[in-house]
Image (cartoon, rainbow, N blue to C red):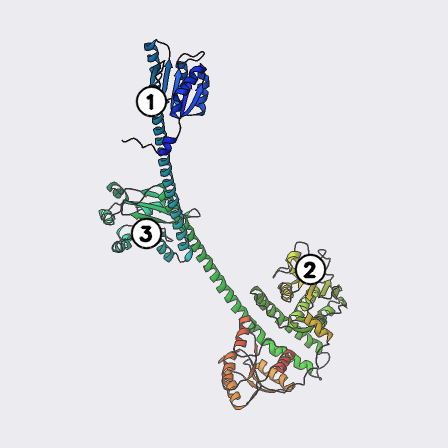
């Protein structure tokens, strides 16, 4: 091996030379002698001082006097050799003692490189010193080169490790993207297998357990297309039951990873019992394999098997760790897909059940409402007759109230469904809250009189005009008053008050009673549907307050309940915002006088005979020309022979639907329409509007409301 070349930088570098002698004159003489070498001369006057110098610096050579007081040169050399840092530093003894043989032997025994007697020949000493100086420089250069080489190797190793780590993170990121792309795990795992090949393995098999504990091959990939077909049929060549010993199945059974870096014949015999199975693996040229379990929530869901057909791939703890990290992410994705499918199935079942419930409620509403319409219209007809005996009128009014109550209960069920879906729709207009409150009170007046309740009515609010849905606001007031009457004993007190805040920005309506009260435990739940607490013994569905709360909030207001406890009565307060529009309307008065009534030709289509007959009579009494029809065919025949201004039609007809009828009528001659039906769900209303109806009324119909809508319908001009 050639010596390392000394560079110019190394040649110019000064080395340290240590001279140890107890006599200052000799120290000076040696320093002068070596001065022309242009090196760093360090002097010490004793062995102890020399040792202190060696603690601070490294020296190329040490000139050590033998005869020194205290610690002589031999003792000093022995101490120098005991320190690892200076155990190889060259020592040249210098002595004037002529006992040459004994001193030289002892000096060499202590590791000295030379023993020189004084007087010293300058040239010889300088030459020897330079030899050791050059040797020191070369040794230091070799050390530096070794350190630089080691540093370079460490840097390379660190760079390779960083690159491997970056590749690992990039691969896992790509795997996460694949796994997050879809919840259809068959496609996802097939894409994952193609990601594994060729980045981690030469071929890959992914097995997932079915509901019966059998492994099913869901994905396979091979870098060699010619081998892919053989791999696709791999499951046909060896069993996938839990009794099999091959890697994927064993890993699934034990839940522990396996790595085999050398697929020897012994390994093949351990994995496969049949020779044809071993032949297949040999044909695939498998050299090593890694199998890792798909584990999530303490369950093993399947396994990923990665096989290499070449020997150049790494096979060790790092590769196993990466495979396990991949399997962990894949298992999480598989588990999430399962949870999503379960949740989706549950949601679909809930939606089907909810849809079935809505259909049932819609049909129930229709079937219950339809018989009420002729009853209510007949009552209205009797009530308008002057020759009805006075003693019968209270009975007629009682029947009417109960019919309206029955309709209200039906509406409550449908309102609850609308509220749960967030589909409450408001028909906003400027309304007089006091007028609506009096209407609601009038409906409940008979019950108040029957219980002989003491009513205190204090309508002190000066600003009462709201931008609101009048039917809904009256419904709120009716619910609150009805609730107070219901839970107040015979002879109790009922107080209704209104007021405004200081800024006149809100209307406050209070309904108080002296009834059964609300205990502290039930008070927070009083506005929840079907929650009545101890009040359940009074009957009812427990829907009125829940619906009222939702309707108040739909008007951007709020409602509260207060009670001192059981038998202490209760106070319900509904607060509505007063809008600028309402305030302007209020300042301008109640508006223009109503326009003159329009006499119109009405085509009434209703298959329920009693409803058809009663509505026909009542509408004719109000001055309308009415032609009744009982089905689509009958209505079309009438429309073909006579012109009508408006059609009032049921939706469900024996030979079609009201929507069909409207579309066929409008196809030949446009006409305005009002739907009159027992179906009152949001989708029913939407279908009516989509079918061309101007308005959708739900049975039992309020004749006054029907009359008002007929008067408001914009008529279609005839050409």
**Is the residue marked by circle 2 packed among few (<14), some (14-19), or many (20+) residues within 10 Å?**
some
Task: List the residue tagged with mark 3.
Answer: 197
**Cα separation between marks 2 and 1:** 112 Å
Residue 294 visible from this viewpoint: no
Residue for badge 2: 561
Q: Residue furthest top?
A: 99
Whether residue 688 is situated above or below residue 354 in the rendered picture: below
Q: In this orientation, does residue 194 appear?
A: yes
| Quarter of the rendering occupied by the N terminus | top left
Element on which disc 3 rests: helix
Q: Position of residue 44 (x, y in %)?
A: 45, 18
Indicate the position of residue 303 as horizontal and vertical percent values: 36, 49
Figure quadrant of the C terminus:
bottom right
Q: Quadrant of residue 265?
A: top left
The span from disc 3 to disc 2 (Cα, nearest Å) is 68 Å
Which is more foreground, mark 1 or mark 3? Answer: 1
Q: CA distance from mark 1 to mark 3?
A: 69 Å
Check the image and report above or below for 627 versus 472: below
- Left or right for 639, reference 515: left
| Disc 1, SS | helix
Residue at left 54%, top 73%? 686
Dot 3 crowding, Cα within 10 Å, few <14, some 14–19, many 20+: many
- State the residue position of label 1: 127
């Amino acid at each position: 091996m050639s010596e390392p070349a000394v560079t110019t930088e190394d040649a110019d570098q000064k080395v340290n030379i240590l001279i140890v002698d107890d006599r200052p004159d000799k120290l000076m003489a040696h320093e002068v002698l070596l001065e022309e070498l242009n090196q760093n001369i360090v002097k010490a006057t004793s062995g102890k001082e020399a040792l202190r110098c060696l603690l601070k610096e490294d020296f190329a050579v040490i000139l050590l006097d033998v005869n020194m007081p205290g610690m002589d040169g031999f003792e000093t050399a022995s101490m120098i050799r005991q320190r690892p840092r200076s155990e190889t530093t060259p020592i040249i003894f210098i002595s004037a003692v002529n006992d040459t043989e004994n001193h030289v032997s002892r000096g060499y025994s202590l590791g000295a490189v030379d023993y020189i007697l004084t007087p010293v020949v300058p040239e010889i000493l300088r030459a020897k010193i330079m030899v050791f100086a050059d040797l020191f420089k070369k040794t230091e250069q070799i050390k530096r080169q070794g350190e630089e080489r080691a540093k370079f190797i460490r840097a390379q190793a660190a760079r390779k490790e960083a690159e491997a780590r970056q590749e690992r993170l990039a691969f896992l990121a790509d795997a996460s993207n694949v796994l997050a792309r879809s919840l259809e795990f068959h496609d996802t795992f097939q894409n994952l297998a193609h990601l594994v090949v060729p980045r981690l393995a030469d071929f890959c098999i992914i097995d997932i357990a079915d509901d019966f504990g059998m492994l099913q091959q869901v994905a396979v990939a091979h870098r060699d297309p010619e081998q892919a077909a053989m791999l696709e049929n791999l499951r046909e060549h060896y069993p996938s039951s839990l009794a099999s010993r091959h890697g994927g199945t064993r890993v699934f059974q034990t839940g522990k990873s396996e790595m085999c870096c050398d697929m020897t014949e012994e390994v093949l015999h351990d994995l496969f019992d049949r020779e044809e199975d071993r032949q297949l693996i040999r044909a695939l040229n498998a050299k090593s394999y890694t199998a890792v379990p798909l584990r999530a929530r303490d369950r093993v869901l399947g396994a990923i098997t990665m096989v290499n057909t070449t020997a150049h791939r790494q096979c060790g703890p790092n590769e196993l760790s990466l495979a396990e990290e991949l399997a962990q992410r894949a298992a999480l994705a598989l588990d999430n897909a399962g949870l999503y499918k379960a949740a989706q199935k549950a949601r679909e079942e809930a939606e089907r059940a909810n849809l079935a419930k809505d259909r049932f409620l819609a049909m129930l509403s229709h079937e219950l409402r339809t018989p009420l319409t002729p009853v209510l219209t007949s009552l209205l007809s009797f009530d308008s007759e002057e020759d009805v005996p006075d003693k019968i009128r209270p009975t007629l009014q009682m029947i009417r109230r109960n019919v309206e109550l029955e309709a209200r209960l039906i509406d409550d069920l449908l309102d609850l469904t609308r509220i749960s879906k967030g589909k409450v729709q408001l028909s906003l207009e400027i309304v007089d809250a006091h007028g609506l409150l009096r209407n609601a009170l009038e409906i409940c007046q008979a019950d108040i009189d029957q219980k002989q309740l003491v009513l205190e009515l204090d309508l002190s609010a000066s600003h009462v005009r709201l931008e609101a849905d009048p039917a809904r606001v009256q419904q709120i007031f009716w619910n609150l008053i009805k609730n107070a009457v219901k839970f107040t004993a015979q002879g109790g007190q009922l107080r209704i008050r209104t007021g405004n805040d200081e800024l006149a920005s809100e209307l406050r309506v209070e309904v108080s009673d002296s009834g059964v009260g609300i205990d502290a435990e039930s008070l927070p739940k009083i506005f929840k549907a079907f929650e009545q607490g101890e009040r359940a013994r009074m009957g009812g569905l427990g829907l009125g307050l829940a619906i009222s709360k939702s309707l108040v909030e739909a008007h951007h207001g709020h409602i509260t309940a207060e009670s001192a406890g059981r038998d202490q009565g209760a106070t319900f307060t509904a607060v509505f915002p007063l809008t600028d529009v309402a305030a302007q309307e209020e300042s301008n008065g109640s508006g223009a006088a109503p326009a003159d009534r329009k006499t119109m030709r009405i085509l009434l289509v209703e298959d329920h005979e009693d409803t058809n007959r009663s509505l026909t009579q009542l509408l004719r009494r109000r001055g309308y020309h009415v032609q009744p029809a009982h089905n689509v065919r009958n209505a079309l025949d009438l429309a073909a022979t006579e012109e009508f201004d408006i059609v009032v039609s049921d939706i469900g007809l024996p030979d079609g639907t009201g929507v069909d009828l409207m579309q066929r009528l409008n196809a030949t001659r446009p006409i305005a329409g009002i739907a009159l039906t027992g179906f009152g769900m949001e989708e029913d209303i939407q279908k009516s509007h989509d079918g061309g109806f101007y308005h959708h009324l739900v049975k039992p119909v309020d004749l006054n409301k029907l009359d008002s809508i007929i008067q408001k319908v914009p008529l279609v001009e005839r050409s």
